[in-house]
Image: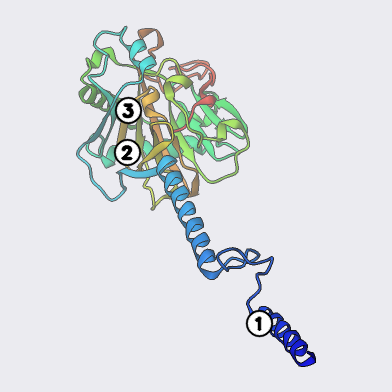
Amino acid sequence: MSEGGGTVRQRKKSSGDGAGNRPRKSKLTSPSGSSSASPSAAQQHQMWARLVLMVGIAAIVYFTTFRTREKKFATQREVLELRTQPLDCSRPYLEEISKFSGCIPHRCGRFVSDKIVSPAEAGILLDLARSGFELGQSAGGASILDLHSGALSKGTQFVNVYRLPESKKLFTGQHINVYRHVKAKVQQAVADNFRLNVDALHLTHPTFFSRLTNATAKTVHDEYWHAHVDKETYNSFHYTTLLYLTDYGKDFTGGRFVFIDNEGKHNRTNVYIEPKMARVSGFTSGGENMHHVEQVTGGVRYAITISFTCDREYAMADPKFSLDDDDDEDGDGGGGGGGDVGNAAMP
């Protein structure tokens, strides 16, 4: 019996040993046999692939939803007979200007040309501007000279240039004739490009020379780089023109003129004009032509803003240019005080 009993005990022991040799399920082992505590290499790869895909999709959505594109409308190296860009008029502008027969644009938009004003004429006007700014400049980066009101930047204030004794020697007969002749040619260009009756266009305030540098702004009038709409800044404006008197990239850096075209809720295109001596640009003054000027980073940028209205109430005459004491006893030269020209948003 003992032998038989011993045999039985041995079998039980062997059975126990066999059970012990079988793989035991760990509490940390998933039904598939993989560990739930640490992902396998394949799972990690899959997780990273998903993350990269999500980031890529987010980037695509962002850059296609919020885009600012750049477009050059006129470069300094080009010589342009005429380049135009038609635009839909903003509703407030169209509703307001529709009251003025002969002054309603065939279509709103903008144009640029290097063939309206000659380089010689631009050179004479640059000489006039430099002479005027010798009598006064802004303490900040933006100075103005308004020959109609007489307003001239000086420090953080404005003075009447015609009340300065030195002004008697500034303006020659040649300056007067060229200024008036250029204004008339620009007026005709606006009428031609927007199909207007030229007699329905009237020069309006402010029309002025500007001198821009990289000096630190001292007053709000020096901060010329903010985006704005001319019609919202000045109720009289219907058409705005710029005549550039110096060259981008040669006489100054920075200082490009920038139209801001909004396309839908989030997309925007910045349309650039690089100033060039004797180059004229013109545009309808409504919300369709929001714009600003880049900050000048070096050198000096000279230009003339020539503004036109369709409303006779806001029309102004050419400046008298006080050339001698007999022209104007108090030296106002046909202009009053500085007016509100200091608030001009400089193109």
* Cα distance between the residues tagged 2 and 1: 107 Å
Q: Nearer the viewer, residue 228 or 167?
A: 228
Q: Relative to residue 253, is residue 88 depicted above or below? A: above
- Amino acid type, label 2: Ala
Report x, y in % for residue 13. Answer: 73, 84
Image label count: 3
Residue under the image location 46 percent in, 26 percent down: 146
Report x, y in % for residue 311. Answer: 36, 10
Q: Pointer 2: what residue?
A: 122
Q: Residues within 10 Å of mark 3 (few under 14, many from 20)?
A: many
Residue under the image location 37 percent in, 45 percent down: 70
Q: Sequence order check: which comes first, mark 2 or mark 3?
A: 2
Label ID, residue 283: 3
The answer to whether the residue labelled 2 contacts the one labelled 1, judged by CB atoms less than 8 Å apart, is no
Q: Relative to residue 202, is residue 124 depicted above or below? A: below
Tag 3, which secondary structure? strand
Query: Which of the colour schemes (rainbow, by chain, secondary structure, one colour) is used?
Result: rainbow
Q: In this rendering, would 112 be left or right of 161?
A: left
**Quadrant holding the N terminus:** bottom right
Report x, y in % for residue 35. Answer: 62, 67
Q: Relative to residue 21, is residue 287 depicted above or below? A: above
Report x, y in % for residue 3. Answer: 76, 93
Q: Nearer the viewer, residue 335 or 216?
A: 216
- Amino acid type, label 1: Gly
The image quadrant that residue 256 belongs to is: top left
Q: Residues within 10 Å of mark 1 (few under 14, many from 20)?
A: few
